[in-house]
Image (cartoon, rainbow, N blue to C red):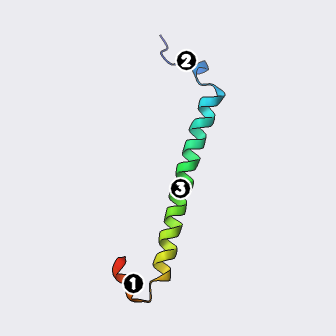
């Protein structure tokens, strides 16, 4: 007995899943880039105490 047949997943569910994964990856990428840029910016000043 199949509880989740293959036909259950429509194009909308697949689209929402792919969009969610891509948005999470993009958000994490931008957070890492921003933190890295801020750390480089303040690496040679007294703001080192923040990091």
Residue receiving disc 1:
47
Q: Secondary structure at mark 2?
A: loop
Decide: few, some or many residues near mark 3? Use Cα within 10 Å; few <14, some 14-19, many ≥20.
few
- Say above or below: 18 vs 42: above
CA–CA distance in space, label 3 to label 2:
33 Å
On screen, residue 22 versus residue 44, left or right, reads right
As drawn, 37 above or below 32 = below
| Residue that mark 3 sits on | 27
The image position of residue 25, as x and y in percent, is: 54, 52
- Give the residue pinned by disc 2: 5
Q: Is residue 46 above or below residue 26?
A: below
The residue sitting at 63% across, 25% down in the picture is 10
Query: What element does badge 1 sit on?
Result: helix
Mark positioned earlier in the residue sequence (3 or 2): 2
Residue 29 image point, x, y percent: 54, 60
- Along the horizontal axis of the image, is 10 left or right of 29? right
Which quadrant would residue 47 be assigned to in this image? bottom left
Residue visible at 59% across and 36% down?
16
């Amino acid at each position: 007995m199949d509880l989740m047949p293959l036909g259950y997943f429509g194009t909308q569910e697949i689209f929402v899943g792919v969009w969610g994964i891509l948005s999470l990856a993009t958000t994490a990428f931008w957070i890492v880039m921003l933190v890295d840029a801020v750390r480089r910016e303040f690496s040679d000043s007294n703001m080192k105490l923040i990091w």
